[in-house]
Image (cartoon, coloured by chain):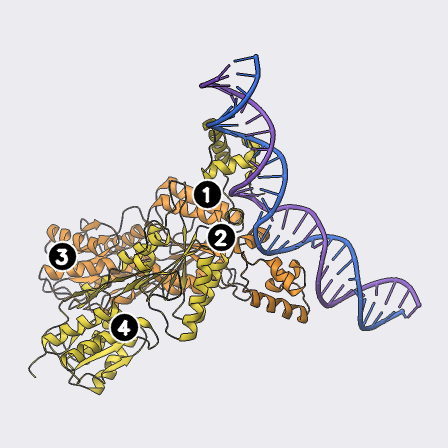
Chain colours: A orange, B yellow, C blue, D purple
Amino acid sequence: MTVTLADVAARAQVSPATVSRVLNGNYPVAAATRERVLKAVDELDYVLNGPASALAASTSDLVGVLVNDIADPFFGIMASAVQSEIVGPGGRAGGERLAVVCNTGGDPERELTYLTLLQRQRAAAVVLTGGAIEDEAHVAAVAGKLRRLSEAGTRVVLCGRPPLPDTDAVALTFDNRGGGRELTEHLLSLGHRRIGYVAGPEERTTTRHRLEGHREALAGAGVTESDDLVVHGPYDRAAGHAATVELLGKDPSLTAVVAANDTVALGACAALREAGLRIPEDVSVAGFDDLPFSVDAVPALTTVRLPLAEAAARAGRIAMGREAAPPGGVDVVRGELAVRGSTGAPRGK
Amino acid sequence: MTVTLADVAARAQVSPATVSRVLNGNYPVAAATRERVLKAVDELDYVLNGPASALAASTSDLVGVLVNDIADPFFGIMASAVQSEIVGPGGRAGGERLAVVCNTGGDPERELTYLTLLQRQRAAAVVLTGGAIEDEAHVAAVAGKLRRLSEAGTRVVLCGRPPLPDTDAVALTFDNRGGGRELTEHLLSLGHRRIGYVAGPEERTTTRHRLEGHREALAGAGVTESDDLVVHGPYDRAAGHAATVELLGKDPSLTAVVAANDTVALGACAALREAGLRIPEDVSVAGFDDLPFSVDAVPALTTVRLPLAEAAARAGRIAMGREAAPPGGVDVVRGELAVRGSTGAPRGK
DNA sequence: TCTCAGATAGAAAGCGCTTGCTACGTACGA
DNA sequence: TCGTACGTAGCAAGCGCTTTCTATCTGAGA
């Protein structure tokens, strides 16, 4: 039925071992023999049986990429970058790894399930992107899984997520706290005092760190007027909209809204506009991440640029062993404040 | 070293066959025995060896999803929807399929390479998303690959791409031509006559169909003033910007710009604004796809809403055999004109 | 009491590939 | 001329699982 190595061997008049070696190119084969084999491969339209080869060699060319939501550009960009870097080592023809993208939807259970599924596939590497869930039991469970993966030879890299102690996982962490602080400092320096904050879901590290940065900035400036102006919600547009409406209800005199990320910021903008408020004349708005659409918002969104593609590409290379892990296995990737049209000095007072 | 089926069998005092049957649940096993086995699995922290099982059963739980660029929400949304639907059949615990997302970058060679790689993995199904490349040799090559995949039992579904004759591939095609026509008809009905068109890359079906729709509308209205106002470029913001600058140079009196998709439209908007033109007072702008950010553009973008998630979800279900293929293996999915603030009547004239 | 069907479990033969080891040449140095 | 080493190719033993076929044990019906 389907063509096997043995068929190719028969046609090329060599042993299966030789065909395997030609295909893997890791053992000397005389040029003439190689030619013959390749010709047979071609004529028979032979395609290696991946599972069989994975079983025999106990390796696999699958690389897992865990994301919260691949439809979100934040994750799409990272997944894309990881994928572009996971080419195989050396010249091995068609030696590309396949990226298995796993949408956890932010659900702890699914995260664990996918990790198990990847372990089952004996994935060559796993890259976990985005903030982590902080539930203690879950963190321990993830750490355990990752430990087991490492033991089995799977390289594990965290990208945009805090390091996981007692684990071999390399971590490229985003400086969410620092970014959050800078952003709010920027608003404070413009003269804002009543700043609404639309935070992400409570239990995520990203949410917490960004919010902590915000609070640090406020505390540093001795500003207390904004203390109650925090609303939590999912990382999506609708949440930004709803939260902004809520904030506006709490304090109609607020002069700025900081959103957990750019998508949320877009929702906030929409809510403000619907309320008849101009940006930034009446209310300034700031986001986080600097996703591609942010520069095209009107006015362009002030935000914290995160080098998503660069960091994820690096994560991919580390996962493939093509780049050394940072010393200590942890590196903090800083964001950069991008001041644009959506923030300005508050009106009057 | 690593725990195998045999280890579990030994600990549970049964044969490997029994363990396998418990795990696969497709053969009667006495409740007591099952308990014992599951207990052993748990105690040993056993994880099935995917490749081995795939080899023995000659099945696999990988599903390939080919996209042009996973960082583009257009594809991200589809990939996400496919992924959410490819759960395994029946209750099989952890029986989820893994989505292998392959970024072709629109490159024909990579498309073929990935198809081979998926064939090598004996993927359970493959979903190809987005427009196809029209080069004849390439189309034939893809058709050949898909035929071979079908023969090997891999279900093939095309989502947002034209049917591929002489192939078992089920096609859910977007009505790009119809959408393009409606969009331009809308502009014509507003009174526009000099309409610039920012098209996608020449060799893609999506590009061609949308452009054909545009031209049909023009021809239907007997309008010829716009005939030379077409510029091709990639499907990204920068291209939209550059093309719009070019169009403005060609005909400074144009009153509308239709973009190949929403991302391109955003670039067009930026270029227009930089040129000091107001939207839609001076120039109307329209996009295609209705990506999430389009409604938040200012003014909100008039576009053709494509049910990306719905279509892709259906593609996923068909790929898993959970939904019947449409009669004839082809179904055309219509878009819906979404008129918003970015289009209006042309000024004066 | 004997037979037979039904329900479970085991034995064992692969699935298609990789790879350590062995075997064969041939060419070279001594 | 012989021994040695190197460059190639083949043998065969798995890799860890699934599944067919067979064996065993039960209880029911005769």
Helix, strand, or loop for circle 2?
A: loop
Q: Tell us which disc is closer to us: 1 or 4.
A: 4
- Marks 1 and 3: CB-CB under 8 Å? no
Residue placed most toward the observer, A178 or B74: B74
| Residue sitting nearer the eye, A2 or B262 | A2
Give how far apart the Cα atoms at labels 1 and 4 are. 52 Å
Q: Which mark is residue A123?
A: 2
**A230 to B236, vertically: above or below:** above
Task: Select label 2 or label 4 by which is in front.
Answer: 4
* Quadrant assignment for the C terminus of chain B: bottom left
Please state the chain letter of the residue tagged with numbered disc 4 in the rendered image: B
Where disc 1 sits, the SS reads: helix
Look at mark 3 in the image and give the residue it sits on: A254
Marks 1/2: CA–CA distance: 16 Å
Tell me which numbered mark, 1 or 3, is placed earlier along the sequence: 1
Q: Residues within 10 Å of mark 2 (few under 14, many from 20)?
A: many
**Outermost residue to the bottom:** B250
Helix, strand or loop status at disc 4: helix
Badge 3 or badge 2: first in the primary sequence: 2
